[in-house]
Amino acid sequence: MKKKIIGKGLLLAVLLMVLVTGLALPTCQPAQAIPRGWSGVAIADGALFLGSMEGKLVALDSATQQRLWDDVPFTQKQSSSLGCQQGTLAVAIYGTPAVTAELVYITGYNGKLYAINRQTGASRWVYPREEVLDPIVGGVVVAEGKLYFGSSDGVLYALDAATGDKLWTFASGGKIWGTPAVNGATVYIGSFDKKLYALNVADGGLKWQFETEGAIVSTPLVYDGTVYFGSFDRYLYALNETDGQLRWKYQGDNWFWARPLVDDGIIYAASVDGKVYALTADKGDTVAVFDLESPVSASPVSVAGNVIMVVEAGRVYSLDAGTRQKKMLAELGEPVYASLAASDGVIYIHSADDVLHAVNAQTGAELWSFELESE
């Protein structure tokens, strides 16, 4: 039986309120109304990796929909306050896993990062080894033998990807919820202190910073010498990659949460106002505005020249800025908050009902669906 969830369009606001304020519900049972994570899908050599709503790492063969190994559960100790007996709770997983030839990396809201053997599902190492960090909302990115992730303690961590040893840290002035972006010798990360930081991948040294008027959780996009990212101040920003100088900014009607996408020189920026803004990459001029009539928090994908978006109400769209046309590909009937993934003409969508959908990117036909929850 599917679990009850909060009504469409309200979940993001409730999550923000709960996580920012640190509210805890006075009950011995976990609140079923509060979201249990919204992990996107990582794809590698025909295998799909994602975090389930039950706090498990799931690995599937995309061709057969068979599990590659038993799900890997992540748990944390339950508080013994208010007379509750101490036990374990599942860990919410919000970030999309990262995959290398040997390991799968996944972050948990319990303040841990896990490295799992890609072939067997066995645990390789955990960071931190003994203690825990503040909750981790964003995902992890791997580049050139290093991995990077941020925590609600406001710190960006750089670890050795093979061993999990800490290489360096950088402290921002606010919570970090976003997933970093790496381009060459620079790693970019936004913070609740309203700043975007450009750091040296070698030692975490600050190259430049840019301040907005709102918190930044959007993962930056680096394209053609420019860094694009959204802010909770309702602006999409384009900065010079070298020195962080503003090239242009564009105002939407609400927060920019999803990562921007570029296709054929057009930036597609989705907002929780339910609109997708198609802008010229060089100047930020408006090409088209698509009203999808439902908030968009999931990062989009581009498949064979089609820009694919999914709204929180569960509708999947294909957008064409050239013709200013939108086409509804599919109606899932389930809320979606997780970032999209695509491979070989197939879109993978993890819904808030903990179902993984495989949809044909051209026709919108559902190829298969897989319920991640245990029997």
Image (spheres, rainbow, N blue to C red):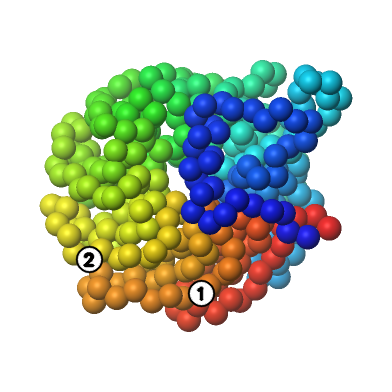
Q: Quadrant of residue 29?
A: top right
Q: Position of residue 51 (x, y in %)?
A: 64, 48
* Residue drawn at point x = 61 percent, y = 34 percent: 109
Q: Nearer the viewer, residue 75 or 46?
A: 75
* Residue drawn at point x = 24 percent, y = 76 percent: 323
- SS class, disc 2: strand
Q: Position of residue 87 (x, y in %)?
A: 83, 29
Q: Whole-Å distance between the Cαs marked 2 and 1? A: 22 Å
- SS class, disc 1: strand
For residue 184, side relative to residue 358 (left or right): left
Residue of label 1: 330
Q: Position of residue 233 (x, y in %)?
A: 29, 38
* Residue drawn at point x = 30 percent, y = 22 percent: 206
Residue of label 2: 288
Amino acid type of the residue that numbered disc 1 sits on in the rendered structure = Ala
Instruction: Determine the residue located farthest toward the right in the rendered image.
Output: 85
Mark yes or no: residue 25 visible: yes
The quadrant of the image that shows the C terminus is bottom right
For residue 63, side relative to residue 308 (left or right): right
Tell which circle, 2 or 1, labels the residue nearer the N-terminal end: 2
Mark yes or no: residue 344 visible: no
Q: Position of residue 146 (x, y in %)?
A: 49, 33
